[in-house]
Image: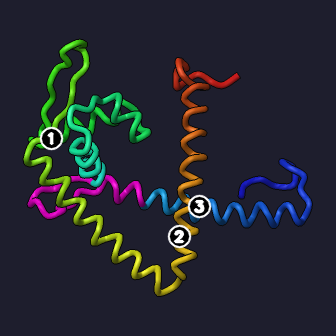
Amino acid sequence: MILNDDDIQLSEEEKADIDRLSKNANTFYKAVSLTNRLNAAPNDYGTGEMSSMAEAHMMIDICGNPGITVGELAEMTQRTPSAISQVVSKLECKGCVYKERGEENYRLYHIYPTEKGRGLAVAHEKYDIEQMTASQKMMLTRFTQEEIDLFYRILDFYNGMIGLELQELRTKNSGKNRCEKDN
């Protein structure tokens, strides 16, 4: 930590608690950072073509919801419409999806999977099953099933907390220029 005694007055017990929390936060940050890198890394999931995990998971979402819009995908995945549009554009360039204008609202495009896109989604679901099975086996060498289940319950709860925090930040910062300072 960069804080010192001049910055904040803490008891020894509070310092120990903050030190423990800081170490846990660093472990969590490292896991998130590694997951983000894995999510963006190109991989052949069994189709003979390179795709990122983000693209593969987006294909799964599109295959499960043919005709979905960018806005609906953004809401479903808790990502920005801009981020979704970028991934959809990549998938469209690869021939995995096609878009059709909405009949009632011509500004909306509905996204549909192609056979190639469905192939990517199926291949990635198989890959996910293999990887999760291998991860589960590895974790069971060190943890009980109950501990693993608790980890996922805690992670699910934490995801909910992060989702709420993101909503609050979007509301608080909507309309603000990124270069403006908070008052």
Q: Position of residue 175 (x, y in %)?
A: 53, 18
* Dot 3 alpha-carbon crowd within 10 angstroms: few under 14, some 14 to 19, many 20 or more: few
Answer whether labels 1 and 3 touch (C-beta < 8 Å).
no
The residue wearing badge 2 is: 149
Q: Dividing the image into 4 quarters, which one contains the N terminus?
A: bottom right
Q: Amino acid at mark 2?
A: Asp
Question: Which of the numbered marks, if any, corresponds to residue 113?
Answer: 1
- In the image, which residues are magenta? 35-52
Q: Position of residue 84 (x, y in %)?
A: 32, 36
Q: Dividing the image into 4 quarters, which one contains the C terminus?
A: top right
**Could you tell me which residue is drawn at 60 percent across and 32 percent down?**
168
Q: CA distance from mark 3 to mark 2?
A: 9 Å
**Could you tell me which residue is drawn at 35 percent across and 31 percent down?**
72
Q: CA distance from mark 2 to mark 1?
A: 34 Å
Q: Decide whether residue 51 is among the magenta residues.
A: yes
Q: Earlier in the sequence, mark 3 or mark 2?
A: 2
